[in-house]
Image (spheres, rainbow, N blue to C red):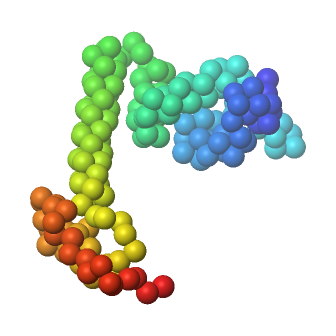
Amino acid sequence: MYRIGELAKVCEVKTDTLRFYEKHGLLAPSSRTESGYRIYTQTDADRLRFILRAKAVGFTLAEISELLSIELDKANWACADVKGLVDDKLSHVEQKIAELERFRRSLSSLSQACCGGPESAEHCSILEALETNCDQIRCENHRHDAKQTHKQ
């Protein structure tokens, strides 16, 4: 049996994390003492570790809740159901990675198009590209007058 602080220490989380999971219905103390302290069992500790591992691989609280439902009623679910959840998550992650790669390429192009000098930003190629929704950013769009300086 664990009190909340003991379970938190054993699983290397903060007590606020346990309260958060409790608030979201993922974890509940097995009982409470007469003075109201939460009491957790080894089963609760195992459940918390399941939650933490699922969170570590990127599952949301809603997805973890679904996985826990399956975990509690394995006989009425197929491996295909669990694999489907994982494959859906994997597809979502791959879409996010592709989106982040597009962001990286665009930001890299913007950065390379700008001289980054102390000149006034009146003709900054980055701002011009963002203003015109330009797909191709060219360094030659950067028209700084050598005598202009940014006033601070």
Q: Is residue 138 above or below residue 88?
A: below
As drawn, the residue found furthest toward the right would be: 35
Q: What residue is rendered at 30% in x and 79% in y? A: 146
Q: What residue is rendered at 87% in x and 43% in y? A: 35
As drawn, the residue found furthest toward the front would be: 147
Coordinates of residue 140 in the picture (x, y in percent) = 16, 66
Q: In which quarter of the image is residue 66?
A: top left
Q: Is residue 107 above or below residue 37?
A: below
As drawn, the residue found furthest toward the bottom would be: 151
Coordinates of residue 23 in the picture (x, y in percent) = 59, 47
Q: Along the horizontal axis of the image, is 106 left or right of 74? A: left
Coordinates of residue 42 in the picture (x, y in percent) = 70, 19
Q: What residue is rendered at 76% in x and 36% in y? A: 4
Q: In this view, does 103 lie above or below 94?
A: below
Q: How many labels does the image show?
A: 0
Q: Which of 50 and 112 is in front in this view?
A: 112
Q: What residue is rendered at 69% in x and 27% in y? A: 11
* Residue 39 visible at all: no
Q: In which quarter of the image is the N terminus?
A: top right
Q: Nearer the viewer, residue 147 or 11?
A: 147
* Residue 137 visible at all: yes
Coordinates of residue 125 in the picture (x, y in percent) = 23, 69
Q: Along the horizontal axis of the image, is 34 left or right of 126? A: right
